[in-house]
Image: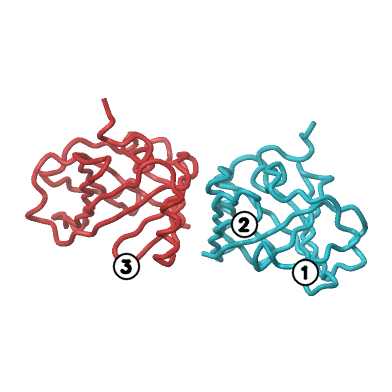
Chain colours: A red, B cyan
Amino acid sequence: MAQETERKFLVAGDFTPYATAAIPIAQGYLCTDPERTVRVRRAGDTAYLTIKSAPDERGWSRYEFEQPIPVDDAQKLLSMCVGHRIEKVRHLVPGGDGHTWEVDVFSGANAGLTVAEIELRDADEPLTIPAWVGREVTGDARYYNSALSTRPYTEWA
Amino acid sequence: MAQETERKFLVAGDFTPYATAAIPIAQGYLCTDPERTVRVRRAGDTAYLTIKSAPDERGWSRYEFEQPIPVDDAQKLLSMCVGHRIEKVRHLVPGGDGHTWEVDVFSGANAGLTVAEIELRDADEPLTIPAWVGREVTGDARYYNSALSTRPYTEWA
């Protein structure tokens, strides 16, 4: 169990010249309750089960329990998930300040959405925002991946 | 991921002379949806995370994914669970036919309830029912531990 501190932004420019890796991810949720999300993720030859608590008031920080699981189990568990499967390609984009951004380009029911996330040691850690990063959406529950599984981007008004 | 085949009965007589072990168990549910229950269990110095699919039509068989987890994580995850915590002592009771019965004596919000379970290789496996075993409740959703966490025995009409 670890404390996870994350900020999330929309993308306002072209990050692709700076990206160093692209990882296809499929994930689903056994529970989308914000107090206790239970996520199944497959990323290439690896798979994880991840449980997160409710975020703090600002939406930056939450407890996270993560456990690698066999890919075959992940496939079965994905078939048991609620709502839409989340499909995205995660691009790793080094920032100038030593941080690495994770830029998720969604497809399927969330096609059209691109979100940039950054993990911090704690909420006070200084962060330089690259030019291609747009409006901050940290704490906006609509952008939680769990929420995108039940109310996907293509169904937003 | 394994297929689990189980039958469940009430207890109509005194099993205690035949019991060979008693294990205190605390467990809770991150998800009580019958299609995808997510259970956190602590039993002494061990802890497990267990995900079960919907049972088949008779309620005997379902898929089960189980993973040992650190006890400290189990304690944190238990604090995130919905409804009532399940507290029970599990007694192991060898049957005459080579099977071992698990007899759960509940306390807390489910005090007064005692249930005997038997795990089978498959639904066709022959089974000798001991004299202390009472009415079968396999498939009766009220007796699912997940259901007992949200509608405990002491609140039944």
Q: Residue furthest bottom?
A: B98
Q: Nearer the viewer, residue B138 or B71?
A: B138
Which residue is at the front of the view, A129 or B106? B106
Confirm or deny contact between disc 3 and disc 2 (CB under 8 A).
no
Q: Residue B86, relative to residue A21: is it above or below?
A: above
Q: Quadrant of the C terminus of chain B?
A: top right
* B118 with respect to A61 (left or right): right
**3 or 2: mark nearer the eye:** 2
User: Label 2 to label 1, Cα distance in Å?
Assistant: 18 Å
B88 to the left or right of B131: left
Q: Residue furthest top?
A: A157
Residue A73 x, y percent position in the rendering? 45, 63
Identify which amino acid the numbered label 2 is placed on: Ser
Of circles 3 and 1, the one toward us is 1
Residue A100: where, in percent of width, then height? 21, 56
**Disc 3 crowd, CA 10 A, few/some/many (<14, 14-19, 20+):** few
Query: Looking at the picture, which amino acid does disc 3 mark?
Result: Asp
Q: Chain of mark 1?
A: B
Q: Residue at x 79, y 53 (%)?
A: B9
Which quadrant of the view contains residue B81?
top right
Is disc 2 in the same subunit as disc 1? yes
Specify which label sits upstream in the sequence, 2 or 1: 2
Q: Any mark on residue A45, and which? A: 3
Q: Secondary structure at mark 1?
A: strand
Residue wearing tag 1: B100
Q: Tell us which disc is closer to us: 2 or 1.
A: 2
Residue marked by disc 2: B61
Badges 3 and 1, same chain: no
Q: Crowding near pointer 2: few (<14 within 10 Å), some, many (20+)?
A: many
Residue A25 in the image, given as x and y percentages of width and height = 29, 55
Q: CA distance from mark 3 to mark 1?
A: 39 Å
Confirm whether circles 3 and 2 share one chain: no
